[in-house]
Image: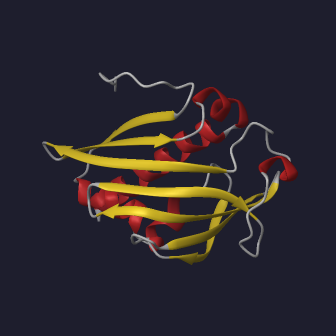
């Protein structure tokens, strides 16, 4: 899908994906912790939530386990939750206790920001949902570090999850 708006990918990741499902289902894939654990990790990885409250002011503490690279902990806060329309949350690299960590200290690119803001919006037309994701990190840096391809893999998992849900 092409985007008619112009975004500065030097400053942010921008991904648009269309799903053949109502926006309530797509939004719930992002907002229901039981569904998040089914897709919110790149290929070959798993996610565990030590804490998660998907509501404005709610926090999360997660661990993505990668058999090749080990565990990656993350904390964040949901800044905005508008049911079926919009999610805004922070992502901060952390340790297992939920303390923020400088990304460079855990082997990440030294240019990776200590905190990013992710905004996901959902619009529906004719039973199909367009999901638009923005993350406040350069798309080039996200592509180089693997974060961007990880988003694409995870969104493929969302699509599979939605197809299975619609077939039930």
Residue 63 is left or right of residue 55, and the answer is right
Residue 67 position within the rendered picture, expressed as x and y whole percent measured from the top left: 79, 56
For the residue pair 65 and 120, the one nearer the viewer reads as 120
Residue 105 position within the rendered picture, expressed as x and y whole percent measured from the top left: 87, 52
Residue 4 position within the rendered picture, expressed as x and y whole percent measured from the top left: 29, 21
**Residue 18 in view in this figure:** yes
Q: Where the N terminus falls, by quadrant?
A: top left
Residue at 54% x, 41% y is: 136
Residue 125 position within the rendered picture, expressed as x and y whole percent measured from the top left: 15, 42
Residue at 55% x, 30% y is: 11
**Residue 40 in view in this figure:** no
Q: Quadrant of residue 25?
A: bottom left
Q: Is residue 98 above or below residue 107?
A: below
Residue at 47% x, 76% y is: 53
For the residue pair 55 and 65, the one nearer the viewer reads as 55
For the residue pair 156 and 63, the one nearer the viewer reads as 63
For the residue pair 88 and 131, the one nearer the viewer reads as 88
Across the whole image, how many numbered discs are drawn on residues?
0
Q: Where the C terminus falls, by quadrant?
A: bottom left
Name the colouring of the figure: secondary structure
Q: Is residue 86 above or below residue 51?
A: above
Residue at 49% x, 51% y is: 157
């Amino acid at each position: 899908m092409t985007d008619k708006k112009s975004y500065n990918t030097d400053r942010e990741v921008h991904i648009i994906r269309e799903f053949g499902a109502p926006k309530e289902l797509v939004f719930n894939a992002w907002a229901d912790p039981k569904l998040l654990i089914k897709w919110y990790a790149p290929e070959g990885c798993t996610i565990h939530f030590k804490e998660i409250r998907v509501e404005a002011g709610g926090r999360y503490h997660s661990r993505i386990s990668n058999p090749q690279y080990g565990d990656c902990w993350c904390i964040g806060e949901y800044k905005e939750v508008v049911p079926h329309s919009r999610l805004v949350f922070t992502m901060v690299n952390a340790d297992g206790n939920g303390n923020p960590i400088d990304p460079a200290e855990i082997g990440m690119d030294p240019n990776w920001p200590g905190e990013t803001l992710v905004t996901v919006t959902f619009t529906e037309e004719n039973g199909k949902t367009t999901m638009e994701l923005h993350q406040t990190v350069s798309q080039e840096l996200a592509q180089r570090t693997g974060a961007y391809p990880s988003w694409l893999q995870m969104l493929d998992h969302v699509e599979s999850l939605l197809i299975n849900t619609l077939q039930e």
